[in-house]
Image: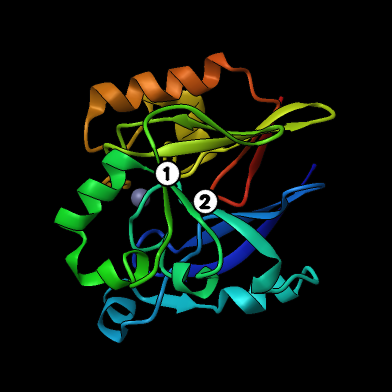
Amino acid sequence: MEIVRLHLARLGKFNDVPVHGFVIKHPRAGAILVDTGVGWPIELLKEWKVVNRHAADALAEHELSPADVKIVINSHLHFDHCGQNAIFKHAPFYIQRSELERARKHEKTTSEWFDFAGARFELLDGDAQIAEGVRVVATPGHTIGHQSVFVDTPDGAAVMIGDAAYTADIYRDADQADLSSWPGQHEDRGDWTRSLKKVQALQPHAVHFCHDTRVLAF
Ligand SMILES: [Zn+2]
């Protein structure tokens, strides 16, 4: 299965990091999209110095359109991971139940990005298979309902880790990582460390990041 990285935005205020989404080109289920970038209320774009892009444009670079996306998985519901969910109204959204509960309480300014009328949620409680060779692994700690996505490839499993580690360095160093310039890496440090160790123990051969262009390969 091919994994395509989408360039959805840059966050100028946050170490000038990229915002990536990913498409898994599944031979039977169709395109599975992991995360949808930032949406469009203007104050938030200013506050975070966002250079934003339309997901449809990012998909078009890979000869895909929103209609090709049959399933959306949100790693979590921070503003830079679910902003354009409404472009994919036709698709179900696979989200951890605890994450939707958290976001409904704490993400009021962006609630219509993920909780719009007619949004079809497939709520998960922990690890789950989404399609053949595609599964989510619960990785709480960044947020309470964070999840990472594992995909079988000919070389072994690849993981789209979401924000369980912002960067390749943080992934490698885990609880020893210097997080001084990365506020918000963990809401719960204990859970976060356990989740990173859980991902590492699954021995992915490739790790894809939402906010780092590096791809770790083992
Ligand atoms: Zn986040």
Q: Which one is in front, 110 or 171?
A: 110
* 89 w.r.t. 143: above or below: below
Q: Which one is in front, 49 or 7?
A: 7
Kind of residue at badge 2: Cys
The C terminus, quarter of image:
top right
Mark 1 Cα shell of 10 Å, populated few (<14), some (14-19), many (≥20): many
- Residue 49 locus on image (x, y percent): 36, 76
218 relative to 34 in the view: left or right = right
Q: How many tags in the picture?
A: 2
Name the residue tied to disc 1: 163
Question: Residue at 71% across / 66% down in the picture?
Answer: 68
* 86 w.r.t. 76: above or below: below
On the question of residue 185 being in view, the answer is no
Which quarter of the figure has residue 139? top left
Q: Are marks 2 and 1 in contact (CB under 8 Å)?
A: yes
Question: Residue at 50% across / 70% down in the picture?
Answer: 89
Kind of residue at badge 1: Asp
Q: Which one is in front, 103 or 120?
A: 120
Q: Give the structural element (helix, strand or loop) at label 1.
A: loop
Name the residue tied to disc 2: 210
Question: Residue at 26% across / 75% down in the picture?
Answer: 47
Mark 2 Cα shell of 10 Å, populated few (<14), some (14-19), many (≥20): many
Farthest bottom residue in view: 42
* 78 w.r.t. 10: above or below: above
- Residue 190 locus on image (x, y percent): 25, 21
Q: Is the C-beta of the residue carrying label 1 under 8 Å from the nearest atom of ligand 1?
A: yes
Question: Residue at 44% across / 64% down in the picture?
Answer: 16
62 relative to 212 in the view: left or right = right
Q: Is the C-beta of the residue carrying label 2 under 8 Å from the nearest atom of ligand 1?
A: yes
